[in-house]
Amino acid sequence: MIDASALTAIDVHVHIEVDDHGHGSLPPDLVDAMTKYFGAEPSRPGIDDVAAYYRERRMAAVVFTVEATTNLRHPAISSADVIARALAEHSDVLIPFGSVDPLGPDPVGAADALISAGARGFKFHPTAQGFSPDDRAHYPLYERIQAAGLPTIWHTGQTGAGAGTPGGYGMKLALSTPMLLDAVAADFPALQIVMAHPSVPWQDEAISVATHKANVWIDLSGWSPKYFPEQLVRQARTRLQDKVLFGSDFPVLTPDRWMKDFALLEFPDDVTAKILLANARRLLAL
């Protein structure tokens, strides 16, 4: 079990990119495109490496895969396997979220299986998974997650996946606009929704939804804090200080880099404590 009182921070956005057999979560040509986009070969640590990395830093990490088999035409890493290993071997440091392909044959059944396996929440990436969050066809899936009392994390804004390729690898950025989540938050008021990343170019939309809906949060992953939009920094200091969460997007961005650059923003100590730890403890019921 995680001893929250001993933690320095909770990173709510950590990817597991490969399984125990070396199978990757993305098609090889998409990995090549992302390598070119980011200008370096991305690190792809397995679950044991991720656990050791965060244990050394006295941080907990919300870990997940992205199940996008239908849209990417590539078998995903098993969320069930990640959940089982995290709970059995790394429950002191890892908080496993599940991932369900909304376009798969039985999303609700898949969610049921992951909840039974011990998922502590669910991750969605509408652009990579190829679905619109406000499509009512997906409402039974949200109903099941809400009934289980589990939070959700949603990719929002620009993505490095497919960036720079012809047609962006067929991925549609508009599926990850924050306003599509406004309808979900309105129709499922007990469902906790975390909008991941600075939602560029829709940052004002994200702020609007988060300030209007009590069940909507923002995580600060995927960007170095020194590049955060000014309005996001201002709101994180003030109105949204109780609804903003530390997330790195590891392994694309390390928590070490994030922490170093966040310190340059000189947030008040009490607000920093909320963002790094207290808000996530409340969201995750730790």
Image (cartoon, helix red, strand yellow):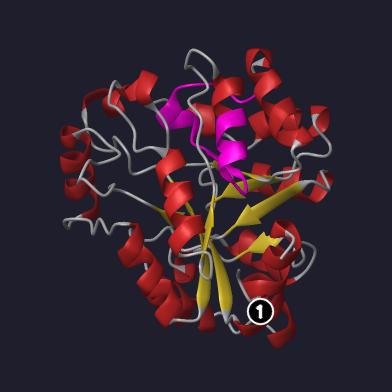
Magenta region = 112-134
Q: Residue at x 29, y 29 (%)?
A: 168
Query: Would you say 62 lies left or right of 130 here?
Result: right
Q: Residue furthest front?
A: 88
Q: Residue 264 location, x and y as percent? A: 51, 83
Residue under the point 50% across and 42% down: 157
Vertical comparison of 53 with 229: above or below: below
- Residue 199 against residue 255 in the figure, above or below: above
Quadrant location of the N terminus in the rendered image: bottom right
Q: Give the left or right position of residue 111, taking residue 47 as reference.
A: right
In the image shown, does 213 or 250 lie closer to the viewer?
250
Q: As drawn, is 195 to the left or to the right of 253?
A: right
Amino acid type, label 1? Thr
Q: Residue at x 84, y 36 (%)?
A: 189
Q: Nearer the viewer, residue 111 or 183?
A: 111
Which residue does the numbered mark 1 point to in the structure image? 272
Residue drawn at (55%, 36%) of the image: 114
Image-quadrant location for residue 192 = top right
**Image coordinates for residue 11, horizontal then vertical, percent:** 53, 66
At mark 1, the secondary structure is helix
- Image x and y of residue 72, in percent: 32, 24
Picture coordinates of residue 131, whole percent (x, y): 51, 21
